Amino acid sequence: MSEDNIYTKGCLIILKTRFWGATTKVSEDQLGDLPPEIVRASRDLLVDDSKLEAVRGIIGEAKRFIKSNTMPFPIPNVDFINKNRITFVDDALKSRKENAIEAVEDLTNALEYEKSRYKSRFPDLYAEGNYPTADQLMDNFEFNWSFRVISPPGKDLAILSPEIYEAEIKAFKKEIQDFQESLVSTIAKEFFYRIDKLRDQCIGTGDISSSTVKSIHNLLDKFDNVYDGCISHKALKDMIDDVKLYMDGTEANMLKADDDFRSMVGKKMGEITSLIVNSKDPRLTRKLDAVKEVT
């Protein structure tokens, strides 16, 4: 699969979420001596915001879930999803949306009580108009996602003139190439910092972290499942395969218990981090914070 047609391997996923913030602006009287033109202040409208946080928590977890199952795309709030993950992600988001709706309903049922608690505790600040009705609360809730296929403009539609069509095809190919190269750089960065941390723990501090080992396994799994077929960079794929040989079945306690094994793994991680930072391919190094020779 060439780098130019990665768009045939998946599509875009767009998640849109919105919900009531349970805050209101602070009035000029409440600002005191602070100039209102330089202050953007708000105050909470709930004494107990646990039910509100339940809704926010589900939305936040859904966003993290999407990120863990997609590839970053150079448009805000848009990600690229491998076609082999679409059904899995779609089903999981449906479940999360159901949970979010239930959490909104819980908040709706408790809102009158929360309003009375706020009014009792802060009578001077209470205003009925600051609170939505049950219908308004639900109307303010949005948790929707969509999948959008990307492809070059169709010549057969005869919408574009030949000159514009050729220019758009050229622009599309450039955008896809930039996207593909950005993916390589993103993976190289994540890969480098994880294995470099393990390298340091194996031959430097000697304090092996279970979270470090787990993060490497997670990234290797993501490469197999999320990035599958979407990365056309032989050198990077060879490095990842090399790490797999050493990390397959390896747990932190194994590295802690065997000095020779720990030293061997640390040496291999060092060899691969050195290959990355000393590479002449800018795709492997452009997203590293600092490029230096690793010995």
Image (spheres, rainbow, N blue to C red):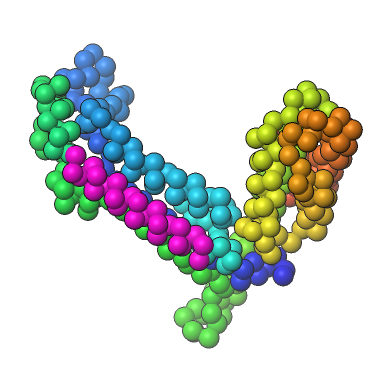
Q: Is residue 209 visible?
A: yes
Q: Nearer the viewer, residue 195 or 162?
A: 195
Q: Quadrant of the C terminus?
A: top right
142, above or below 263, in the image: below
Q: Nearer the viewer, residue 99 or 232?
A: 99
Q: Position of residue 208 (x, y in %)?
A: 74, 29
When asked about the image quadrant of residue 39, the answer is top left
Q: Position of residue 85 (x, y in %)?
A: 56, 63
When asked about the image quadrant of residue 6, the answer is bottom right
* Horizontal arrangement in the rendering, residue 199 relative to residue 110 (left or right): right
Q: Is residue 16 visible?
A: no
Q: What residue appears at the point 23 percent right and 42 percent down from the top-left corner? A: 107
Q: What residue appears at the point 65 percent right and 70 percent down from the top-left corner? A: 5
- Residue 181 among those drawn in magenta: no
* Horizontal arrangement in the rendering, residue 70 relative to residue 277 (left or right): left
What stretch of residues is rendered in magenta?
87-110
The overriding secondary structure of the stretch rendered in magenta is helix
Q: What residue appears at the point 56 percent right and 54 percent down from the top-left corner? A: 69
Q: Position of residue 170 (x, y in %)?
A: 63, 69
Extreme top residue here?
33
Q: What residue appears at the point 50 percent right and 66 percent down from the top-left corner? A: 87
